[in-house]
Image (cartoon, helix red, strand yellow):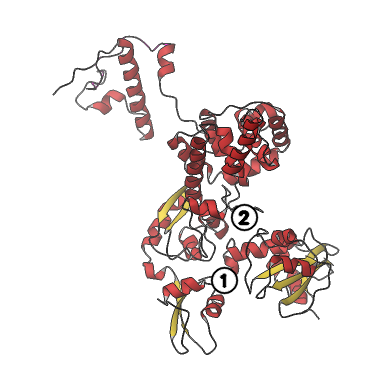
Amino acid sequence: MTYPMPALTQRTIRLFQATCWSLILSSLLLSGCANVSLPQLVSGEQAVNETPTIPFLLEEPEDSLSTEDIALLPEPLPEDLWARIRLGYQLDKPMNKRVEQQLKWYAKHPEYMNRVAKRGERYLFHIVDEIEARGLPMELALLPIVESAFDPFAYSHGRASGIWQFIPGTGKMFGLKQNWWYDGRRDITASTDAALRYLDRLHKRFDDDWMLALASYNSGSGNVSKSMRKNRKKGKPTDFWNLALPRETEAYVPKLIALAILINNPEDYGLTLHSIPNKPYFAKVETHAQIDLAQAAELAELDMDAFYHLNPAFNRWATDPDGPHSLLVPIANEAIFTQKLSEIPKEERVTWERYTIRNGDSLSTIASQYDISVQSLKTINNIRGSTIRAGKTLMVPVATAGTDFYSQSLEQRLAHRQNMSGRSETGTRVNHKVTSGESLWTIAKHYNVSTRKIARWNNMAPKDPIHPGQKLAIWTSTKPLQTPSSNAVIRKVSYKVRQGDSLHRIADKFQLKVKDIMRWNQLNAAKYLQPGQSITLFVDVTHVN
């Protein structure tokens, strides 16, 4: 069966022809043929002055395009990602006192806005692409600024983690795997997909009201529904602006609206946004097997900090042996990483050590020694129960580099947080080793501090579970009891540099590491210490003579 061609107006034909010529010329320019005349390119047999024949064009345009015609031509893609975000705005943006308050704060802190923009540059193109593909409001791309300031390692008092700040339960509900090796709440692509699915679901639940959906994302749909029911009983409006919600939630939606207004017209608020190119920042590369992160970073020719910020979901020194088996690398590094990865057999992507079981060993002691989970040790060695026999051997994966090299592993982030906590605390630091039967509440009572402070010092939430053997940094003015659970008493010391001092000499004197002294004081290795300069040290007074 044949179908009749629709009637085409001359104006439609001219518009179509102009678009085709535009595409052809753009293609020629990109291919480096800008200096070759167009007729010559079409056919070597055609005369130079002859207009080339293109079969799909019905006839030559009789006259130039009108202003109306030009307006119908497809808009070129914006070069800056902020411009693309503005084009996708869909939400109403009322200017009320709550929005004005947040807008004033953002406008007064341009350094914060640019710091966040630079941090988010790694992730924003992917988020924008995902939002656009789903037809969602582009304002949602700004939500990670409100949630985490684009910090992939952000962790809140409510146990929320990652740039989208998923709590454990909601993360699992949306398929975000969480175990000893890996936390999908910090996985950039997986958490973005989960967050947008969650927001879309909330939008449908609240009858396409984005304000209520956003409020629910922050405080839970149950809290929003409960507040709406109360307003109905009192005959009050049930829109977001009239609901009684937690203080954090009442500020949450205005923050997003204020950001959208600010980014739409930054010049009106004296702000110059850090420009973000409208092009992909990273590519996903399949590894098909577990791989040591130090090895992966070396193959991708990246330093560990840059590597971890694209792959923040991995808690340890290697990827999860059970997957996901993929890594993100900058677009510029994709080819070299893929090539080098293909040259290494899967079995050589993790270093293995054969361990001979000794009398008194247990799975937990061996796992602790090798910084691996008991479950992983059992899975690797096909152990069903918990019984092991002396003389038998176990295969154990080991890190190829020192622990400190994995700069953003769970252990290193915790150590950094514990060390940095002393900058704002007074008293004595105690490294408390949790024993069986202890809780955060009993430990806090013993040292006369709050559970909330202990949680903050140790990068955890007050309701997080603790386990025997876990080490907690605690700052207290109460004299600590020297028990087996207290391995060290650490004091914050202000040390004045003397003539002839060096970082190495000071480190030896106080039994510290040079890199720790540099980190505590943000020192530059290229600059010498000056006599009279004051530096902060955290000294274990039980080991210094």
As drawn, the label of residue 159 is 2
Principal SS element in the magenta part? Answer: loop
Q: Residues within 10 Å of mark 1 (few under 14, many from 20)?
A: few
Image coordinates for residue 181, horizontal then vertical, percent: 51, 64
Q: Quadrant of the N terminus?
A: top left
- Which residue type carries mark 1? Gly
As drawn, the label of residue 125 is none
Q: Is residue 62 magenta?
A: yes
- Which residue type carries mark 2? Arg
Q: Residue 200 or 185: which is nearer the viewer?
A: 200
Q: Is residue 365 left or right of residue 270?
A: left
Asked which quadrant contains residue 487, the reply is bottom right
Residue 257 visible within the image: yes
Image coordinates for residue 514, horizontal then vertical, percent: 70, 69
Q: Is residue 518 left or right of residue 154?
A: right
Asked which quadrant contains residue 98, the reply is top right
Q: Residue 53 or 79: which is nearer the viewer?
A: 79
Taking 69 as reference, is 477 above or below it? Answer: below
Sequence-wise first label, 1 or 2: 2
Image coordinates for residue 336, horizontal then vertical, percent: 42, 55
The residue under the point 58% across, 43% down is 222
Q: Is residue 36 left or right of residue 425?
A: left
Q: Secondary structure at mark 1?
A: loop
The residue under the point 63% across, 42% down is 146
Taking 271 as reference, is 280 above or below it? Answer: below
User: Bounds of the magenta span?
Assistant: 51-66
The residue under the point 25% across, 26% down is 42
As drawn, the label of residue 402 is 1
Kindly report the distance in space between the C-alpha atoms of the residues bearing marks 1 and 2: 29 Å
